């Protein structure tokens, strides 16, 4: 972490030269509005990182720790967050179309108004209660055409979420905070709401 505080420019230069910063401690780093597209931050710690407005298209964050990170307004199409820990992260207003979130912990994360069209969201830890002490929110998120499988939505706020053509396979919907009619436009092979 000391390097990230002392030499952010050096870290970014190294990331661009090598293709990423894998397995690094970058806790609390300020990467607001930075272009990190296509870089690899797998297994890195970015807890509390400021990623507001960052360009994260096809950025790899496999098994990364992003607890409390702020992705507000990030441009993150096809971002790879497989197995990532997004506990309590703020992703509101981000464009995450085509994101891969399989196996991620999103407990207490805020996905309000996020574009998650055509995303892959499988076996995600989203239910409440969770370690963050807050409910996960997908309020007004666009999940059109997303593939959502084996995810427990108990206590998760789905109000206003667009679920048109979302394929919800083995999703646990009982206990979700939603209007029952929202699931009418989804393709569900899930437990009854």
Image (cartoon, grey):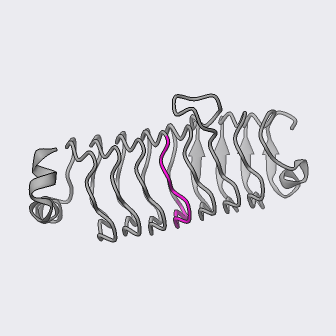
At x 74%, y 58%, the residue is 161
Determine whether 143 is above or below 173 in the image.
Answer: below
**Nearest the eye: 134 or 53:** 134
Judge from the rendering whether residue 184 lies leftward or rightward of residue 43; answer left or right. Answer: right
Percent from the top left, x then y, of residue 137?
Answer: 64, 48
Percent from the top left, x then y, of residue 106?
Answer: 53, 41
Which secondary structure is most common in the magenta stretch? loop
Q: Quadrant of residue 118?
A: bottom right
Judge from the rendering whether residue 108 lies leftward or rightward of residue 183; answer left or right. Answer: left
**Nearest the eye: 47 or 170:** 47
At x 41%, y 69%, the residue is 53
**Nearest the eye: 187 or 71:** 71
Percent from the top left, x then y, of residue 1?
Answer: 16, 44
Q: Quadrant of residue 98?
A: bottom right
At x 48%, y 39%, the residue is 87
Judge from the rendering whether residue 4 lies leftward or rightward of residue 118; answer left or right. Answer: left
Percent from the top left, x then y, of residue 91?
Answer: 51, 56
Quadrant the C terminus occupies: top right
Marker count (numbered) = 0
Judge from the rendering whether residue 79 lies leftward or rightward of residue 151; answer left or right. Answer: left
Determine whether 99 is above or below 149 in the image.
Answer: below
**What span is colored magenta in the figure?**
88-98
């Amino acid at each position: 972490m000391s390097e990230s505080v002392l030499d952010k420019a050096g870290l970014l230069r190294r990331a661009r030269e090598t293709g990423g910063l894998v397995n690094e401690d970058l806790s609390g780093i300020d990467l607001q509005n930075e272009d990190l597209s296509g870089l690899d931050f797998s297994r890195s710690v970015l807890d509390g990182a400021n990623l507001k407005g960052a360009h994260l298209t096809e950025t790899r964050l496999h098994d990364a720790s992003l607890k409390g990170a702020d992705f507000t307004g990030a441009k993150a199409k096809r971002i790879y967050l497989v197995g990532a820990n997004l506990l309590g992260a703020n992703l509101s207003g981000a464009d995450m179309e085509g994101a891969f979130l399989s196996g991620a912990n999103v407990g207490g994360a805020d996905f309000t108004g996020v574009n998650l069209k055509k995303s892959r969201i499988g076996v995600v830890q989203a239910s409440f209660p969770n370690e963050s002490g807050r409910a996960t929110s997908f309020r007004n998120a666009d999940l059109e055409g997303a593939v959502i499988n084996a995810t427990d939505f108990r206590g998760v706020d789905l109000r206003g979420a667009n679920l048109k053509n979302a394929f919800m396979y083995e999703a646990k919907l009982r206990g979700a905070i939603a209007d029952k009619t929202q699931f009418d436009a989804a393709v569900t092979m899930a437990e009854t709401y």
